[in-house]
Structure formats: structure tokens, C-alpha cells
Image (cartoon, rainbow, N blue to C red):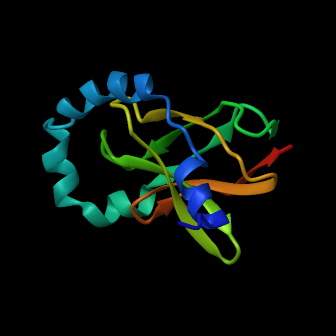
Amino acid sequence: MAITKRHSLRIAAVGVVSAASVVLAGTVASAATPTAAASASAPQATAAKAGITAKPSVTSVKAWQLFRVTGNATGLKAGSKMVLQQKQGAKWVSLPAVIPLSSKGTYSLGVKLGLKGKNDLRIVSGNTASPVFHVTVR
């Protein structure tokens, strides 16, 4: 079976630190709070205020070196899936790096990239995306 560059990138581009997922998984259970009813009555206001920040721990790494992307989100429910996306050509491709948003509205994602050069990345949850940030892989 021939493995294409895109296929190998999708399989091995991102490693998520599973310990962080296990720790944050407990926050999903606390997502059902009285504020859920309040946000259900004003979904348009929530969508208008939704925002995500993202900051990599480094701007340059060696191939497959672990680094972290941290940030916070406003206007999103605790437990919302925070997904890392990489620009490949003209398209944004979701990488297999997903972590739930904590009850405090924060996230911390462990990432390993193998595609050398400048990587344009962002964090997405639903229709909300962070500003683009760059990590160079040497």
C-alpha cells in the first residue's frame, strides 16, 4: 500500500497528550449547570460573543518535538471540542488533535508536527476559530 504524504501527515502529524484528555474529561460531567438553560434562551448572543485564543509554547521546533498550544474560549460550553487545524494548500485540515474545553474555559493541547517548514495552525470549535498562528518545523 502506497502511503501518500498527506496520509502520513494525517496519521502522524499530531500527538495528543492523553493525560490532559483524561484530566479534562471530568469537566464534561459538570457542563450541565443552570447556566445551560440561560444560554439556550439566547443562542444568538452566545454565538456573537464566541471567541478562541491560541498561543503555541514555541515558534520553532524540531520534527516530532512536543510543544503545547494553550488558550481560552469565551461563549462556548465546557466540554466543547477544541480541534487543531493545519492549512494544507488552500484548505484547512482538521488534525487528530482534539481536547475538551475545561469548565474554566481553558485548554492545553500537546502537539507534535512532522511537516517541515512554516505551519499555519489554528484552533476551531464549531464555527468559531482562533486567529492563525505559526510554528516552524526544522
Position above or below: 116 against 5: above
Measuring 13% from the left and 48% from the top, which residue is drawn there?
Answer: 37
Q: Quadrant of the C terminus?
A: top right
In the picture as drawn, the residue positioned furthest to the bottom comes out as 90
Position above or below: 117 against 69: below
Measuring 74% from the left and 53% from the top, which residue is drawn there?
Answer: 115
Q: Can you tell which quarter of the image residue 85 is in?
A: bottom right
In this rendered view, identify the residue nearer to me: 6 or 66: 6
Measuring 55% from the left and 65% from the top, which residue is drawn there?
Answer: 93
Residue 18, position as x, y percentages in the image: 42, 28
In this rendered view, identify the residue nearer to me: 12 or 77: 12
Seen in the image, is 101 located left or right of residue 120? left
In the picture as drawn, the residue positioned furthest to the front comes out as 1
Number of numbered tags placed on the structure image: 0
Seen in the image, is 14 located left or right of residue 27? right
Residue 40, position as x, y percentages in the image: 17, 56
Seen in the image, is 56 located left or right of residue 26? right
Residue 4, position as x, y percentages in the image: 62, 67
Residue 34, position as x, y percentages in the image: 13, 37
Measuring 48% from the left and 34% from the top, which residue is drawn there?
Answer: 107
